[in-house]
Image (cartoon, grey):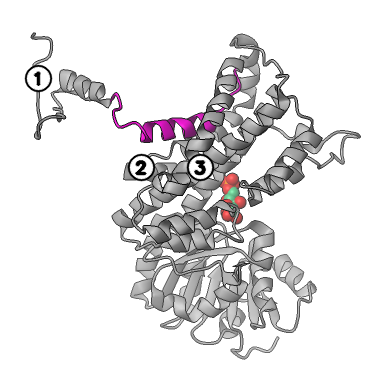
Amino acid sequence: MNTQANCDFGMIGLGVMGRNFLLNVADHQFEVIGYDLDKEKVEALDKEKAGDNVHATAELNTFVGALKSPRRIMLLVPAGKAVDAVIDSLLPHLDEGDIIIDGGNSHYDDTTRRMEKLEDAKIHFLGMGVSGGEKGARFGPSLMPGGKIDAYEPVRGILEAAAAKVNGEACVAFLGNGAAGNYVKMVHNGIEYGIMQLIAEIYDVLRRRGGLSEEQLHQAFKSWNEGALQSFLVEITADIFKQSDDQVEGAMLINNILDSAKQKGTGKWTSQSAMDLGVAIPTIDSAVTMRYLSALKDERTKAESLLSGPEVQKTDQQEELIAQAHDALHFAMLVSYAQGFAMLQKASEEMGFGLDLVEVAKIWRGGCIIRSRMLEDFMKAFAEDKQLANLMINPDIAKTLSQTASQTRKVLVQCLEQGIPTAALSASLHYYDSYRTSRLPSNLVQAQRDYFGAHTYERLDKTGAFHTIWGAS
Ligand code: 6PG
């Protein structure tokens, strides 16, 4: 290739996400270059013949030399040590004012550390969440950049061009200071875990209690996707139920997939950070826990014959169950989002991100895995009250939750009676019931703490800290 510095944008890491994102940027008339140590990946991009404005190299010098100043370089390499290694190899080749964007699922603490290190070298660093998987990267992801606004401005045009569009608006916005972008993406993934687990539980109820065939499951989710539950995850779930197994004649693929879910860690980080912040996100926590329990396939298989429970009886009220399950999923999806947004509100305060939750809801409407019709309502809710502590107390959302809660209870009663595990669905209802209960039994916990540890308690009728010599009267 011509080695003049005429490229607008460079990508390091030409795996699935990197290659697709680069091609997406190139579609918008930018001159781009990709770099990867792996020659096969470089050749694969070359072979794609995506256009004269797409270049690829396995030489770092060529890559850096091809970029216009300030250099705009995005990394899409596995989160963790690889990011540090790439930054270290890149640093000697960069000039003041160049911009590095880390587009991986990096931990927010790593982003903060990298940002500080690069600030000393006067290199701009943005931590940017990228959501939407392979297709999103290629045709329009949701982009969640954070860091310093000075670093964002020179890349704004490229990111706005590449991002998904909803009603003509790009699903990208500068989210805030420091590691805001990675933090928002982490919580996005936590919500993603929550909704995926909820859908899986509803599937189990419909299949085992409702006796729905794969075709009926497909129809149910397909019709749900045309109403209030319209979302990417419900849409792909409908598709999954109609996929036949090309390895077993006459079988549906879903029935031959091992029931052991893997994870890369972002859901766990969400739960860990929520615990550190003192924020309750039990739907998301349950979803993370269920991934661990699902992984115990051998133990579960042994336990099945040892630990007794009810045999699931099929209902003769299939239609009614489908309607209840619809409302339960609606209810619990709302709760899952509510927990994620409440966490972001608190994290922004504590960590000084300066998040605007209207913008977060806005850029999650398209491109990302948790995109759904509900996001429009959340945008409205936060536009009415930027400081809203919890979406559940927005009057419109409260109304929907109140309307769908009774159907959720009906699903859960059956699951308890039938022994169908519904950890995330139960956690969602318990969260709701706890949140709407002004008098919880935590007075007793306080009494116990004071009894055995003299930890003191507060009173309803007086201010101050009190201690009692328990058992004396
Ligand atoms: C996205 C996804 C993406 C990825 C997750 C899956 O927004 O595009 O969240 O980032 O699919 O990392 O995570 P697990 O492997 O942990 O399920």
Nearest-to-viewer mark from 2 and 3:
3
Query: Looking at mark 3, is its residue's CB closer than 8 Å to ligand 1?
Result: no
| Percent coordinates x, y for residue 43 in the rendering | 75, 71
> Which residue lies most toward the right here?
249
Per the image, the residue denoted by label 2 is 279
- Look at the numbered discs 2 and 1 and tell me whether their residues touch, using CB distance below 8 Å: no
**Label 2 secondary element:** loop
- Based on the picture, tell me whether residue 368 belongs to the magenta stretch: no
- Mark 1 belongs to which amino acid? Thr
- Mark 2 belongs to which amino acid? Val
Per the image, the residue denoted by label 1 is 468
- Tag 3 or tag 1, which sits nearer the N-term? 3
Judge by depth and name the residue closer to the eye, 116 or 388.
388
- Based on the picture, tell me whether residue 440 belongs to the magenta stretch: yes
Judge by depth and name the residue closer to the eye, 28 or 208.
208
Separation of marks 2 and 3 at Cα, in angstroms: 23 Å
Q: Is residue 68 above or below residue 396?
A: below
Residue drawn at x 39%, y 45% as measured from the top left: 393
Q: Quadrant of the C terminus?
A: top left
Residue 261 in sight from this viewpoint = no
Density class for disc 1 (Cα within 10 Å; few <14, some 14-19, many ≥20) is few
Residue drawn at x 42%, y 75% as measured from the top left: 124
- Mark 3 belongs to which amino acid? Thr
- Look at the numbered discs 2 and 3 and tell me whether their residues touch, using CB distance below 8 Å: no
First to last magenta residue range = 419-441
| Percent coordinates x, y for residue 257 in the rendering | 74, 35
| Percent coordinates x, y for residue 316 in the rendering | 73, 19
Residue drawn at x 58%, y 15% as measured from the top left: 417
Tag of residue 400: 3
Nearest-to-viewer mark from 1 and 3:
3
